[in-house]
Each structure stands twice: as structure tokens, then as C-alpha cells.
Amino acid sequence: MKFYKDHYDVIVIGGALAGLSAALMLADKGKDVLVLERHNLPGGIATSFVRGGIEIEAALHEMMSIGSKDHRLKVGKFFDDMGVDIDWLKVPEAYHAAIPGLEVTLHPGLETFAREVDAAVPGTYDKVLAVLNLCHTVFDSVNELSIHPMSKVQMLMKHEAFVKTAGYSTQEVLDTFDLPQKALDLLAPYWIYVGTGFKELPFTIFSVLMADYIGYGSYIPRKFSHEMSLKMAERAEDMGVQIEYRQHVDKILVKDGKAYGVRTARGDEIYADYVISSAYPNKVYTSMIEPADAVPVGAIKMVNGRRLSLTAFSVILILDKSAEELGIKDYSVFHGDTMDTNACYDELKGLGPYRYITCICHNLANPDATPEGTCSYSITTLPRVDGWKTVSADEYDRVKHEVARQLIDYMSEYLGVNLLDHVLECVIETPMTVAHYTGMWNGCIYGYAHTMEDHIVARLQTAEEEHFIDHLEFSGAHQISGDGMGPAVTNGRKAAKNVLDTMAKEAKA
């Protein structure tokens, strides 16, 4: 009996959230799908691991676009529609901002958030609420336009706020509200999750981020992010998807400008009508296309012209006391000596010391995250890939531990507790960890940076021009919707939709 079928409708390279989302959507439409995953488990960075008998979340801080049971947002609804049953826990707050002159815990809900900012910076309620309402209007427009494209005239008539703000940076739009700096500082912490300072960050991206997180709150799976990927994989197999692990795809086979299959590292040639790749275009177009001369010059220009966004450095600690005993009061804390997002972004190009970090205590959203009397505490910064590309193999261990110690000392001083005195387990995740474990290009977890020259609106306009090889689609963080686990699901669905649309079009021809 053959290990692989003679032919599939679609081969999906990568069994992380994007690839599995694509596979689920295609299988739901009756397509014959093969998923090839290089690791021995699904999920990519949506995974967990065990140290000292304790399961530890590897990456997820919070999921966006989930929503409550009676008001699902697009990602939560997709899971429900696909029959992927996740036990979602709502994160109790938006975030705690710990910056000079401000120690404020803010909660989701547009009016709630605005009132809490007003309590910290009196007289700002109306303007902050106006900012959030504008974000929500743009957010609604983005969601509608992603499903129902329309002409520029129609957009201007129905989506005026979206059209009027699409060409402006976050800083330019926020400046028009004439808010005090402290209020602006309280609106800024989430910037790190989109990885660009306000002077370059398109207001469209900021709007989607704020409206989703602040408007509806965020969620985590009770059994960590691996609950998502394992249940997605299980459901996909129930729907007829073939998933094979420890199968590294070496080449994407192309003939007459059209993808027709793949070759694995062990030499298996597998054929399909379409290929969806979770590998970055940087990797695909420079070393995975066979024959190499099937790569158009425009594809190389495209990947060279795009700027990689952020990678990750995280110290995950299992501590020997509860969060309450250690004085950890908030699930999510953004801490820094400035909230100048542009300065913070510039600083992230190096190897530290890092001035802006985010800390998560999972037990404050999921009390059962660790055994009773202990807690999980992660300290994370999201540097740019630039600096870490310079670290040699000989320097790696020293640099890794120096940065980890800086982050631990930084938060120990803030908490007034020497965290090193309470460590049961310590795991250090670096950009190299990410690159090695997932194959993400240069360890970049957030795809291509959203900037005023290159973001979701511009990418939608150029999507057809950047379709360089027929029957080859891309999914993952590097695609149109951008960074994060929620957008990865959306990107996977988009890749599947592109395949289905092309199938339908070619069937009519």
C-alpha cells in the first residue's frame, strides 16, 4: 500500500494554525487535502512543552477575534463552524500599563476603557472614546471589505472613515485628537503586537488591533495554544485530511509556470493541483522552487523589497509561589521607561538592554495553568531580526543568558521580588529557537512589517500582481492580514479561498 496517494487536490506545506485552517476550509468543501509538517506535532509556535512535570505555554499571550459564545468574532466563529471545540477563557483585563508616572490597569469595553483612561488623565473621556469609536468603525469596514470588495466610489459612500484614514499613520491620526501625552501613552501599549512605531504604523492596522482587543476582549484556550492546534488537526483528519508529520518539504515542483506538487527531503514526489505554503516567500522563492529558473524576477524583487517585522525573545519562569504571594496582580503588564513607540521600535534593532517588555502570568486568566502554590510568569520582548542575525554560534549562549538575566532583573526590581530566588523551571526562547523549531525565516514571527508604504490596504491592491506562480498560494503570518495567531488563521482561510475561487473559475473556462 502506498504511503501517499497518486494525486491530491491540494498539498499544504506546514501544519501550524494557518495551514490547518486552510486544510479545514478545503476539506469542508469536499477537497482531498494532504498536510505535510516538518515537526512531530502540529501547531508551530502554537504549542506547549513540559519541564519538571509541568506543562508550559510556549508562545500565546492572548487570542484576538474570538468573542463571547453569543457574539463570536471571525476566528471564534470559524472554529465553531468547523466543529473545533475550544474551551476559551476570557482574559480579565486589556492590560496594565507600567510606565513613568502611570500605573493603570485597563479593561475591555470601549466606554469602560475610556472611563479608566479618564480616571488616570482627567478630562479625556470624550476624546478617548472618539478615538476608540473611530477604530471600531474602521474595524467594521475592514471586515466587510475583506468579504465584499467594492469600487472606490462605493467605499467612499459606505466606508468614509476607512477611506479618509487609510492613507495616514497612527501618529498622524492621533495627533488630530489633541490628547495629553499621558492619555496617548495609555492608548499605545498594544503597538508591540503589530511591531511598528506610530510614525510608520498605518492607522488601519492600529484600528483593527484596538477595536478587536479593546472592544471585545481577548481569550486563551484552557489547555494552552496546543489545544487549538491539536483539536484543529484532529478535526481535519475526521474530515478526511491526511496529515503526515516529520515530513520536510524540500522543493515545490513547477512546470509551465504552474505548481503541480512537492518533493520531500527523503525524496518522495507527491502531486497535486494546488500547493499552499506556510513557508515564507523568502525561503520559497530563493531555494524551494524547482526548477529554479521558474521563479520570476518580480518574486525576488518583492521579497527583497519587504521588511521583516519582529521576532521573539522570551523567558518563561515557573515560580515556587502563587502570583498573589509574589505580588503579581495583573495577567498582562506592559512595562517600559518610555511609551515613545518610535524610540522603542528603533531600540529593538539591537541586542538590548530592552526598554519595553510585556509580562504575562497565565494563572491570572487560567488558575489551573500550573500546580497549586506555583505560577507561570513569562517576560517577553519582540526584537527586530536585524540584531539577532549578527549573533554567531560562539556568542549565542553568552548573549542569550545576558539578555535573559537583564529581563529577569528588570522585572524583579519592578515587582520588588528577586525572581531568581523562586525559580522552579526556566526556559529561554530566542529568535534562533523559533527559527529552528518552526522554520520561520530568520525567526520572524510577525511576517512583513506593516508600514505606510506596505500594509494591508496596499497589499490588497497588489495581490494579483504578486501572484507569481499559478496554483501556488501562501498562508501564515507573512500574508496580507499580518502578524499574530488570529491573523494566521485568517491568512490560512484566505489561501484556501483563493484556491477554491481559482478552481471554480477554471471549471467554468
Image (spheres, helix red, strand yellow):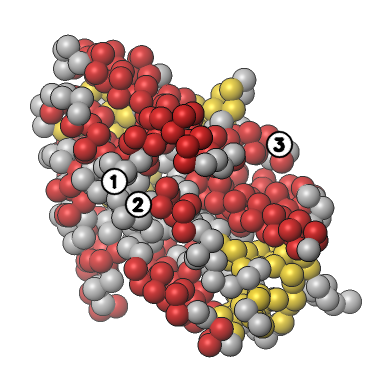
Q: Position of residue 501 (x, y in %)?
A: 69, 54
Q: Position of residue 442 (x, y in %)?
A: 37, 68
* Mark toward the viewer: 3 or 2: 2
Residue shown at 31% from the left, 18% from the top: 129
Q: Amino acid at mark 2?
A: His
Q: Quick check: 361 left or right of 69?
A: left
Q: Are marks 1 and 2 in contact (CB under 8 Å)?
A: yes
Which quadrant of the figure contains the N terminus?
bottom right
Q: Amino acid at mark 1?
A: Leu
Q: Amino acid at mark 3?
A: Asp
Q: Which residue is mark 1?
A: 201
Q: Position of residue 39 (x, y in %)?
A: 58, 66
**Callout 2: 10 Å neighbours few (<14), some, many (20+)?**
many
Element at label 2: loop
Count of number-bearing discs: 3
Which quadrant of the figure contains the C terminus?
bottom right
Residue shown at 30% from the left, 50% from the top: 452
What is the CA distance from the residue labelled 3 to the residue labelled 1? Answer: 33 Å
Closest to the observer: 438 or 133?
133
What is the CA distance from the residue labelled 1 to the residue labelled 2? Answer: 6 Å
* Mark toward the viewer: 3 or 1: 1
What is the CA distance from the residue labelled 3 to the residue labelled 2? Answer: 30 Å
**Callout 3: 10 Å neighbours few (<14), some, many (20+)?**
few
Residue shown at 12% from the left, 40% from the top: 337
Q: Earlier in the sequence, mark 3 or mark 2?
A: 3
Closest to the observer: 16 or 75?
75
Name the mark on residue 81: 3
Give the vertical position of 101 relative to 233 (above or below).
Answer: above
Q: Position of residue 83 (x, y in %)?
A: 73, 38
Q: Which residue is mark 2?
A: 450
